[in-house]
Image (tube, rainbow, N blue to C red):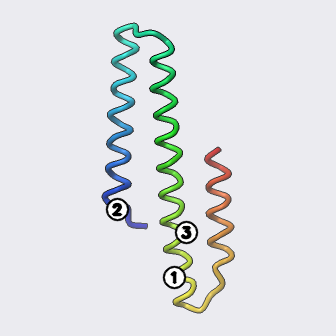
Amino acid sequence: MTYNRDVKNRLSRIEGQVRGVSKMVEEQKDCREVVTQLSAIRSAVDRSIGLIVAQNLESCIREAHESGQNADDAIQEAVNMIVKSR
């Protein structure tokens, strides 16, 4: 799979958020602020997983269609990845 600029940008943003939370912990910030930021990171990771799975699924379905194959296996694999990420 080829990862596009959007995926790379999302991951860079998440990386920055994690560094920010680490700094907050070093500075002994209020736990509510830290948890809020960690929740935002988790949400960003979940959205990134969804984007990657969706792009992969789209690619697999397109390839299956072009080769005259059934896309059921690709769909099941995508569902399994989503379930596994939970």
Rendering coords of residue 67 (x, y %): 54, 90
Looking at the figure, which quarter contains the C terminus?
top right
> Is 57 located above or below residue 63 in the figure?
above
What's the CA distance linking mark 2 and mark 1? 18 Å
- Which residue is labeled 1 in the image? 63
Q: Secondary structure at mark 3?
A: helix
Question: Type of residue at label 1?
Answer: Glu
Labelled pair 3, 2 in contact (Cβ < 8 Å): no
Which quarter shows the N terminus?
bottom left
- Label 1 CA crowd tier, 10 Å (few <14, some 14–19, many 20+): some
Picture layout, residue 58 above or below residue 20: below
Q: What is the number of callouts on the image?
A: 3
Residue named by callout 2: 4
Q: Residue at x 51, y 81 (%)?
A: 62
Mark 2 lies on a secondary structure that is loop
Residue 41, numbered circle? none
CA distance separating discs 3 and 1: 10 Å
Residue at image x 55%, y 69%?
57
Nearer-N-terminus badge (2/1)? 2
> Residue 60's spot in the image, x, y percent?
54, 75
At label 3, the amino acid type is: Leu
Within 10 Å of disc 3 (Cα), the crowding (few <14, some 14-19, many 20+) is: some
Q: To which residue does mark 3 refer?
A: 57
Q: Gap between marks 3 and 2, in whole Å?
A: 15 Å
The spot of residue 72 in percent (x, y) is 68, 76
For image coordinates 40% across by 7% down, the residue present is: 28
Q: Secondary structure at mark 1?
A: helix
Residue 13 drawn above or below residue 58: above
Instruction: Check disc 2 and give the amino acid type.
Output: Asn
- If you read the primary sequence from the N terminus, does the residue marked by circle 3 or circle 2 appear first? 2
Query: Which circle's residue, 3 or 1, is located before the other in the chain?
Result: 3
